[in-house]
Image (cartoon, grey):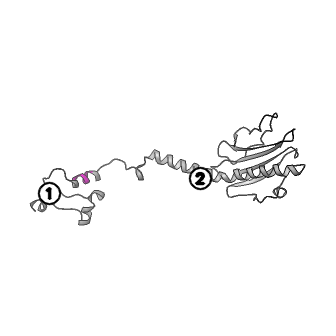
Amino acid sequence: MKFLNGVFYRCSIVGAVLVFLFGCSASEEGYSGSGSQVDGASNLARDDRPIQPELGYSEEQVQQLEKQAQQEEAKARQSEGKFFVGAVNRAQQAYRLENPEFASTMEELQIILPPEGTNYQFEIVPQPAPTLSVMATATAKSEGIRSYAGAVFVLESGARESILCETNEPSQMPPEMPAPPASRNDRPQCPTGSSPL
């Protein structure tokens, strides 16, 4: 009782229970105890060290997590462009089996694909020799995502080869027309600034 009489609390009763969280402290008037929890809380409240972000992550870790989240979001958006070009490539190969030339429009291909998606503008690009090759593009409508180009070629043997190219960096310009195979054993080649998928 003598000990309690010598202490004047600056916190409410509830605040005293939560003293560690709120940094409330008891006055040291008449108190001769050795290093109490209240003193520790007061010292903690006066600590000038920077507070770490939530969940204990450092600022660098937070930045890495945000970058990873952005990359995952970009991949999800890019799936729209890859799907379109891949679907057109497959449809063109089937169309060419029954026709002397590749299709120059979506209507000719008779597949239900819109000319524009949420993230991309789509286009079939006829080539000077429509019996031998055709191109399709998916052009990004906004920054932060990559663009795509696909092509189908008819070889001298009558076989068909296709390729899907992705820009190496986010771009609102699709790759140029891929190069046809240089020989029977070669594959089509993506232009500079893009890579095959």
> Which residue is disc 1 drawn over?
29
**Which residues make up the magenta segment?**
39-43
Question: For the view shown, which residue lies furthest in the left direction?
Answer: 2
Instruction: Determine whether, in the image, residue 64 is placed left or right of residue 112.
Output: left
- Most common secondary structure along the magenta stretch: helix
Residue 21 coordinates in the image, percent (x, y): 30, 58
Name the residue located 75 percent from the left edge and 54 percent from the top edge: 122
Answer yes or no: do the residues labelled 2 and 1 have beta carbons within 8 Å?
no
Q: Quadrant of the C terminus?
A: top right
> Which residue is disc 2 drawn over?
73
- Magenta span includes 159: no
Q: Earlier in the sequence, mark 2 or mark 1?
A: 1
As rendered, which of 187 and 193 lies closer to the eye?
187
Question: For the view shown, which residue lies furthest in the bottom direction?
Answer: 13
Residue 153 coordinates in the image, percent (x, y): 82, 43
Query: What amino acid does circle 1 point to?
Result: Glu
Name the residue located 84 percent from the left edge and 46 percent from the top edge: 127
* Count of labels in the image: 2
Residue 11 coordinates in the image, percent (x, y): 24, 63
Q: Quadrant of the N terminus?
A: bottom left
- Secondary element at image label 1: loop
